């Protein structure tokens, strides 16, 4: 019972899940895969329209036709547009649940519909990867209710033996419930353990271990890389004057600002008390512009004072060498540029470009 309670209460951060998917070279294609699945579902609807499998009357073909057309738009939305917001994702789930169930009920043969109900498992897999247990369980209830309706139709309106329909139902429940539940629980606890091992609990950014584990998997076959080290100036005075709780709020605000100017697939991390790191494959110009915007925005993270930051950027070409093997050297160079910014009075950006001179802005 305690295990079930723990599973139910585990939080799931949709935004973090999406950011992680966007940052990984393989998972980054999840969005395209979802769009392709929408089109595949549309193709199933078209095949249902051109074959004699729908119930008689005008309504079943109309329902199937509407969903066939809608999958074209929804699929392009997934393939060509950014990831949906949390609310947009919930709307997509509702669309998928209603769409699949409506087409299943429109089929004339409940036995065929029960076999096709496995399509609900595709929605379950998406939920297991990106949403919390509450939303996932709501999907499971919907899927079981759909199976119950199809099972009742099979018993009432066909001559198929009850034993055969029951066997179909058992297999369907195993496919739709057992496997997705185990997968969702596994991913939920795996994410929790990963957060503990690789992420800073205060800011939600990666820690040094998380940074090291991320750089190679996120940046395959890159030719250039920029590493940014940002350190808040005189941060000790913030804790001394306003307390550590207020200082923690400033750090959390800094982390949110950092993520805003360096979104995924850039890697953001907190590697020390008030030291932050960004690893990105953006061009030097783009990285330096974002760093300058970050410098200008940092003071707003401290509502009671004027906190500034010193930022160092190291930019270089990398040739056929794992970035993790260079990470220490890259961080040392960016760190040296950051300390040069502090030496010049802080509240500035120093750029150490191996292909150019050191540049300084403030």
Image (tube, helix red, strand yellow):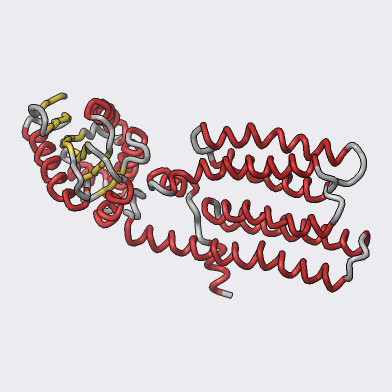
293 left or right, relative to 96: left
Residue displayed at 89% across by 66% down: 160
User: Of residues 174 and 3, which is closer to you in this image?
Assistant: 174
Q: State which quadrant residue 42 falls in.
A: top right
Instruction: Give the percent coordinates (x, y) of residue 131.
Output: 55, 52
Task: Identify whether 9 is placed above or below 29.
Answer: below
Res 28 seen here: yes
Task: Identify whether 250 is placed above or below 322.
Answer: above
Res 231 seen here: no
Number of marks drawn: 0
Instruction: Give the percent coordinates (x, y) of residue 117.
Output: 73, 56
User: Of residues 310 and 162, which is closer to you in this image?
Assistant: 162
331 left or right, relative to 301: left
User: Of residues 78 and 12, which is closer to you in this image?
Assistant: 78
Instruction: Give the percent coordinates (x, y) of residue 236.
Output: 18, 45
Instruction: Give the percent coordinates (x, y) of residue 54.
Output: 85, 46
User: Of residues 108 and 290, which is closer to you in this image?
Assistant: 108
Q: State which quadrant residue 177 falls in.
A: bottom right
Residue displayed at 7% across by 27% down: 357
Quadrant where the N terminus lies?
bottom right
Residue displayed at 81% across by 44% down: 51
Quadrant where the C terminus lies?
top left
Residue displayed at 26% across by 44% down: 242
């Amino acid at each position: 019972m305690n295990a079930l309670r723990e599973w139910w209460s585990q939080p799931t951060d949709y935004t973090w899940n999406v950011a992680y998917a966007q940052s990984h070279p393989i998972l980054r294609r999840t969005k395209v895969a979802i769009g392709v699945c929408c089109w595949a579902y549309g193709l199933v609807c078209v095949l249902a329209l051109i074959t004699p499998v729908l119930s008689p009357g005008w309504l079943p073909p109309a329902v199937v036709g509407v969903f066939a057309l809608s999958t074209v738009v929804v699929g392009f939305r997934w393939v060509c547009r950014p990831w949906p917001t949390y609310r947009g994702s919930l709307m997509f789930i509702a669309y998928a649940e209603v769409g699949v169930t409506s087409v299943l009920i429109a089929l004339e043969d409940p036995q065929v519909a029960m076999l096709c109900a496995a399509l609900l498992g595709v929605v379950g897999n998406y939920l297991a990867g990106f949403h919390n247990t509450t939303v996932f369980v709501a999907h499971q209830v919907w899927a079981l209710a759909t199976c119950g309706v199809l099972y009742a139709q099979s018993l009432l309106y066909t001559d198929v033996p009850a034993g055969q329909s029951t066997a179909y139902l058992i297999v369907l429940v195993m496919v739709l419930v057992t496997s997705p539940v185990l997968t969702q629980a596994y991913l939920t606890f795996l994410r929790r353990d990963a957060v503990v091992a690789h992420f800073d609990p205060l800011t939600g950014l990666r820690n040094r271990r998380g940074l090291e584990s991320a750089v190679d998997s996120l940046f395959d076959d890159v030719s250039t890389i920029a590493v940014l080290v940002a350190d808040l100036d005189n941060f000790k005075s913030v804790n001394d004057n306003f307390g550590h709780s207020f200082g923690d709020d400033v750090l959390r605000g800094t982390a949110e600002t950092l993520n805003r100017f360096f979104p995924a697939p850039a890697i953001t991390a907190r590697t020390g008390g008030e030291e932050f790191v960004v690893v990105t494959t953006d061009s030097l110009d783009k990285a330096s512009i974002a760093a300058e915007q970050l410098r200008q925005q940092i003071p707003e993270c401290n509502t009671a004072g004027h906190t500034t930051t010193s930022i160092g950027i190291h930019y270089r070409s990398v040739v056929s060498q794992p970035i993790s093997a260079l990470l220490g050297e890259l961080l040392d160079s960016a760190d040296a540029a950051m300390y040069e910014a502090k030496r010049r009075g802080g509240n500035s950006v120093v750029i150490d470009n191996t292909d150019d001179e050191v540049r300084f802005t403030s």
